[in-house]
Amino acid sequence: MRGSNLLPKGVQATVVLSIAPPETTSASRANLENVDDAKVAQLPLEAARVKWFDKAKGFGFANIWGSSEDVSVHVEILRRSGLADLQASEAVAIRVISGKRGKMAAEVCSWESVSRD
């Protein structure tokens, strides 16, 4: 007899009880816990362009205009800044701090929100 209907499919899930996002344990997230919001607010907002951002991975990179050096952007910073996602080539304004692994965004603002001020 031929046909895939006759082959056993194995164990199948019939009910999904819950779905939870994976715990984030990246080094950049650990750096965020030591960030002083008052000091961050004193840093200049710098014009930047998003290089890439992967919401599933929880991070991406941007470049300050006029510089090729990467600035890491963590999804938790986006949440703190009131943003949900970033698109490649999107213009943003960021406050940059130095982390253990290089420069990282401590705050991200939409370009529209800062260009109105």
Image: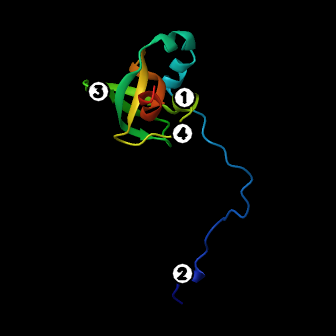
How many residues crowd mark 2 within 10 Å: few (<14), some (14–19), many (20+)? few
Q: CA distance from mark 1 to mark 2?
A: 51 Å
Q: Which residue is mark 2?
A: 4
Label 4 amino acid?
Answer: Ala
Q: Which residue is mark 1?
A: 81
Quick one: 15 or 96, which is closer to the camera?
Answer: 96
For this orientation, the residue located farthest to the front is 116
Q: Can you tell which mark lies on residue 65?
A: 3
Using the rendered view, name the quadrant where residue 90 is placed.
top left
From the viewer's perspective, is residue 33 above or below residue 48? above
Q: Position of residue 58 (x, y in %)?
A: 50, 36
Label 3 amino acid?
Answer: Trp
Q: CA distance from mark 4 to mark 1?
A: 9 Å
For the point 51% across and 9% down, the residue is 39
Q: CA distance from mark 3 to mark 2?
A: 57 Å
Label 1 amino acid?
Answer: Ser
For the point 52% across and 85% down, the residue is 3
Mark 4–mark 1 contact, CB under 8 Å?
no
For this orientation, the residue located farthest to the bottom is 1
Q: Which residue is mark 4?
A: 84
How many residues crowd mark 3 within 10 Å: few (<14), some (14–19), many (20+)? few
How many residues crowd mark 1 within 10 Å: few (<14), some (14–19), many (20+)? some
